Image (cartoon, grey):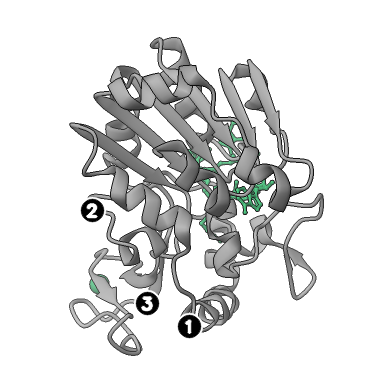
Amino acid sequence: MCFFVAKDLSATIAGMQISEELRRRFAEAQRVLVLTGAGISAESGVPTFRGGGNTAVWKGMRFDVISSAEMVERDLPAVWEWFDYRRDFMDSILPNPAHYEIARWQEQFSTLTLATQNIDGLHQKAGSRNVIELHGNIWRARCTACRSSYDMSQGPRPDGCLECGDRLRPDVVLFGEMLPPGAFEFAVERAAECDLCFVIGTSALVYPAAGLPEIAKRAGAYVCEVNPELTPLSDLCDEVLMGKAGEVLPLIGR
Ligand code: BV8
Ligand code: ZN
């Protein structure tokens, strides 16, 4: 594994060395898997959950407490308050160069699979298609009973389900809940057959998403991490580019 540490970004980003190995594999790759986390949206102004050592807290509750299946049972209005606050915040947020670079990459490879843990929809806003939303999307609500889905990007959600009248909840995956049917399985398939895997802006602490690069590595893929900090995955990676995604990604394909 080789490190390219960007000590003072402005100076060395220009000099950040993308290894010849990564350049060659990027030029020759057929099947690429990209896994992203909150860090890729940081330069767009979206707060991360853990970067910098502390954990996001809402009204005194750790985020993985308020964002849990148990909280939906106990206090759904509180869960809505948390996600309504974040959705309102997201309204004015735009993608950054990292999102646009990945959207550009999808034209370059025969297969580019983009799996994100982010619920912010910024990859799609940047033009990425067929994004695997492992943890759902903050712009959708769904019925707690019949799973009817409601798009909130065009306007407020109805008070209750228009099909069965039951309560609506955020269409995101909460802690203790299974990922969307088929989404993770499809990502596992692509991880097991990719020849190049990028892990961008994730602390790699939440499973099963953090298991995808491990599957890619076991399948022989070249795994490259982009993150200003080391993570539990860094040791497994063939290359670690220690910098901000919005500054590093545009360097890779050039
Ligand atoms: C489940 C939606 C089956 C809601 C989210 C195995 C071991 C241990 C625990 C478990 C396990 N398997 C399951 C669990 C339990 C749990 C889990 O993983 N717990 C963790 C905390 C240990 N997993 C689950 O519950 C999952 N479901 O397993 O179902 C099941 C069912 C029943 C019973 C048992 C099992 C569901 C998990 C999904 C939860 N929902 N999000 C919401 O958004 O509120 S998770 C949420 O948190 C995000 O989606 C993301 O996944 C995670 C945050 O991580 P990151 O995105 O990586 O963000 P973070 O802030 O941590 O890090 C940012 C990184 O970016 C940092 O490294 C930073 O350095 C870097 N960075 C900063 N700036 C930049 C940058 N990088 C690049 N450029 C920059 N500019
Ligand atoms: Zn319903």
Residue 221 x %, y %:
40, 16
User: Which quadrant of the frame does ligand 2 lie within?
Assistant: bottom left
* Amino acid type at mark 3: Arg
Q: Residues within 10 Å of mark 1 (few under 14, many from 20)?
A: few
Residue 175 shows in the view: no
Per the image, the residue denoted by label 1 is: 92
Q: 151 or 178, which is in the foreground?
A: 151
* Amino acid type at mark 1: Ser
Per the image, the residue denoted by label 3 is: 167
CB atoms of marks 1 and 3 within 8 Å: no
Above or below, 156 against 18 in this view is below
* Amino acid type at mark 2: Arg
Above or below, 75 against 250 in this view is below
Q: CA distance from mark 1 to mark 2?
A: 21 Å
For image coordinates 59% across by 52% down, the residue present is 39
Residue 220 shows in the view: yes
Residue 2 x %, y %:
65, 18
